Image: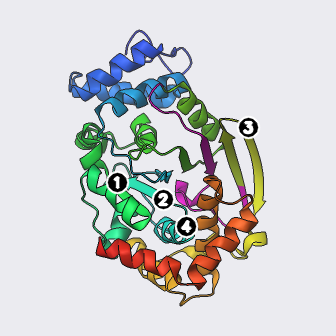
Amino acid sequence: MTEVVGSGTKSAEDMTREQAAEAMRRIFDGDPHPTTLGAFWLANRWKHNTPEELAAFTDEMCERAEYATPDADPVDCGANYDGKGRTAILGVAAGVVAAGAGTPVVAHSGDRTPTQKQDVYKHVLDELDVATELTPRDSAAMVDETGVGFYYQPAFNPAVADLFDARDRMGVRTFVNTVETLANPAGASVHLGSFYHLAFAKKVVETFAESTFHDLDRVVMFQGMEGYDDIRPGYTKVADWSATGGFDDYEIETAAYGMDFAEEDLQVDDVAEDSARLTREVVAGDRTDHWYDAVALNAAVRIYARDDADSLDSALDAARAAVDDGSAAAVLDDLRAF
């Protein structure tokens, strides 16, 4: 702490992989004094972590997580665990629609995670009467039986869940907020995420590459609304990495894919409750407005990320077909019955 990362914003040095791994082991073991832990987290916040450091943190976390891999190879959606507070969460509906089109999807989150402690996947699923507080084995079974799965952080990643109080007292985001989204509890080969700046997406890709635990085929990230994995309307930057093709970034104009509206049009009064209601309405085919377009596009990104379509256009056609022919509605029925 004092010799490496804690000397100041300009003089702080990067940790070696061994130092970062030791630090994370000590954190999980409850070794640092709370003052030292807070100082360490804050020092890393001003220093900015390298991919090597983040990979060491991630691998130490993964060693303590309980993994349950479904037979299906789903798209892993690890959206920011501290949630959204203004716009609807589209990922549940998008996952259901993608599954209806034949692309299995997994989401994972905690419950009111610091610092924002806002609504996440779990709360939308709770509003839909879908079981969320499952064992990892049951979460894997959910994927295979319905096409959609949810993994609950306290069940599969208790080491991070146990840091709740310390993180809550910090009052600011730490590297744990990044690392927990990379847990990939279903052992998926495709990760879907979001970023504020393209440099962060590159750092995540490099983190996965440095990780000795993960071995992904593809990482797709984009500038999501409120830092979440919901595509924002308008100009959206996409980062796309594959093990065979390397790193690429490109832009999409969402108006070309049916999202001819503004982010303000996706705001809701109650994020969890309204997101669940909109999920039901879109999946049932009761809406043909901008909510239908937004869900279809987000589903299309999941389909395309898994290479279940050769273009975003064809993935969008598949997503819309899954709503129109009732396949998505059947997935939601199965999910609620699980």
Within 10 Å of disc 3 (Cα), the crowding (few <14, some 14-19, many 20+) is few
Which amino acid type is marked by label 4? Answer: Ala
The residue that label 4 is drawn on is 98
Helix, strand or loop at label 2? It is: strand
Q: Which residues are drawn in magenta?
A: 212-236
Which amino acid type is marked by label 1? Answer: Ala
Q: Which mark is residue 318?
A: none
Q: In the figure, is residue 314 to the left or right of 62?
A: right
Which amino acid type is marked by label 2? Answer: Val
Helix, strand or loop at label 3? It is: loop
Residue 110 image point, x, y percent: 32, 53
The residue that label 3 is drawn on is 245
- Disc 1 to disc 2, C-alpha distance: 11 Å
Residue 98 image point, x, y percent: 55, 67
**Dots 1 and 2: beta carbons under 8 Å?**
no
Q: Residue, x 33% and y 51% (percent of image)?
A: 113
The part of the image, by quadrant, that contains residue 121 is bottom left
Label 3 vs 1, first from the N-terminus? 1
Q: Residue, x 34% and y 61% (percent of image)?
A: 142
Label 1 vs 2, first from the N-terminus? 2
